Image (spheres, grey):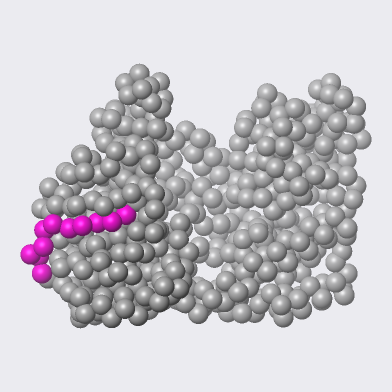
Amino acid sequence: MWKRLTSCLLAAGLVASMTACSKQEQYNMEPGVANTDTSQTEFTIMGAVSALSKGYDDNEVLNQMQDEAGIKINWNVMSDSLSEQVNIRIAGRQLPDAFLAVGFNNYDITTYGSDGAFIDLTPYLTEEYMPNLTKILEENPDIRSAITMSDGCIYGLPSAEKMGTAGIGAEEDYSIYTIPQFSMINKAWLDELGMEVPTTLDELHEALVAFQENDMSATYYGNDAGSTIPMSTGFDQWCWGQNIFYAGFGFTNWPNDVINDLVLTPDGKVEFVCASDNYRDALTYFHDWYDEGLMDVEMFSQSDTQLISKCSQGYVGVSTWWYIEELMGDYADDYVFLPILDGPDGTHNVTVRTGGGTTSGNLSITSACKSPANLLKFFDQWYEPENVMQLQYGPIGTYFTDQDENGVWQSISDDEAKEKFGKTAGELKGEYEVYGPKLILSDYYNTTFKMEDRAIERLADLNDFWMPYVDSTVTYPVDCVYTEEELDIIDRYKTDFENTVSEQEGLWLKEGGPSDAEWESYLIKLNEKCGMKELLNVYQSAYERYMEAKEAE
């Protein structure tokens, strides 16, 4: 929602006055020591609310937790004009006791924390003040690392939805985003041609050639002559790109997001895939496929809707998506997942990804709060599984109606919601959902409330079919925290770096290359104009701080 909120304040010339005032009014002045004052029991919280919400004053879950904590909260929440109002409050030195679901980024949080507007919560993350959250942080040191700013302080409580394979009872917990692309092939066509499901890139090439030469869309489905598209994907798209096939060269990349083009070596060194020899070899190899007409000529321009249209009409032999049924429509039964394919040298490796990041911008307590311990007692209840379930979806008895034999809550169906409330289950969720520091861990779906059916299907596919092909689960953590100077470097170079890599990759796939001279020129440009060395230094430093914070636990 916000990016560099401080720039707005700088433009108004108000940062200096905010800093001076916040430090004068701050109740918790001694660094690293909890404020033991408990005299304040009424608090004002400013923040966001869903446009569908009725507000928080009469929210039964919030009111029950306030009673448990012995406090009263005056809610100043809005769905429109929030950033403008927060700007006014901060700049005018009229701070509430806390900001909720404003969406501060790490730059904002660090700036306001160092200025004294936000208090350091580290002294309160103990068994005495926040037992629920403290237990979670002890068991998940990566979450503490993600909310620890570059100055070593914590200015916001963690929020994340960690949907992973533990939620379906698997022993290892892999995020639903671990492998963004699932590849699939028309097995009915293979059977018709007397071919097996490929296990190598070279075998897939043979299959694609056979699909093309025999015009399988026409001969098998009766479509127009020449309608067969051996392979169709997007270009560098998250779930529907061509990148999963690069695994045969030791990596999978997403250069439209620089974080997703980073890899970690076994000794913890950060590198860019797009500057490796394996990357060069992959582009040279797949250009031949494109040149032969095996890869869709429209892959660089088509939308996901256009891809779905082609696949659902029976034109496409191989593609990528999360769900076969969703992509292939009436022809879905003819398709199976492709395994991760070995490359020309007999090896493969998928560059796995971390899940959705952990943020700390959804709850910050300000220096205007006289008794933060009382307020944090209330928010510690948000980290109880059954409470966060109700804050996310709605109260027991409304959104959650029954428990299964294991005590796991089952959500209301659309039909039930329409009959009882006159709205869909999604609309019901929007009405009751509370924004803020909600942390949903994978095992909650296994122990507390049922996961959505589509997510269960995708995680089952990930765990049972795809993960056995993954050789290494080492990945660059998406939750690294950056200093102000590092953020400036990222802002300066990131867009140019991503655009240069993506444009050059597309050009080499279409036109061939790179020659030795082209490759050398490309690397020089990445270093001298796109800041590759500077970016690597930033990501390396951030990673090392992340690991230090994690190992300190």
What's the residue at 43%, 75% (across, down)?
10
Q: Nearer the viewer, residue 468 or 142?
A: 142
If the image is split into quadrants, where does the C terminus sit? bottom left
Residue range in magenta is: 37-47
What's the residue at 27%, 70% (across, down)?
93
Quadrant hosting residue 205: top right
Residue 432 in the image: state x and y as whole percent. Answer: 31, 38
Q: Is residue 217 left or right of residue 186?
A: right
What's the residue at 58%, 69% (across, down)?
264
Residue 446: in sight, yes or no? no
If the image is split into quadrants, where does the N terminus sit? bottom left
Residue 203 against residue 23 in the figure, above or below: above
Residue 501 in the image: state x and y as whole percent. Answer: 72, 65
Residue 516: in sight, yes or no? yes
Q: Is residue 337 left or right of residue 403?
A: right
What's the residue at 88%, 40% (across, down)?
209
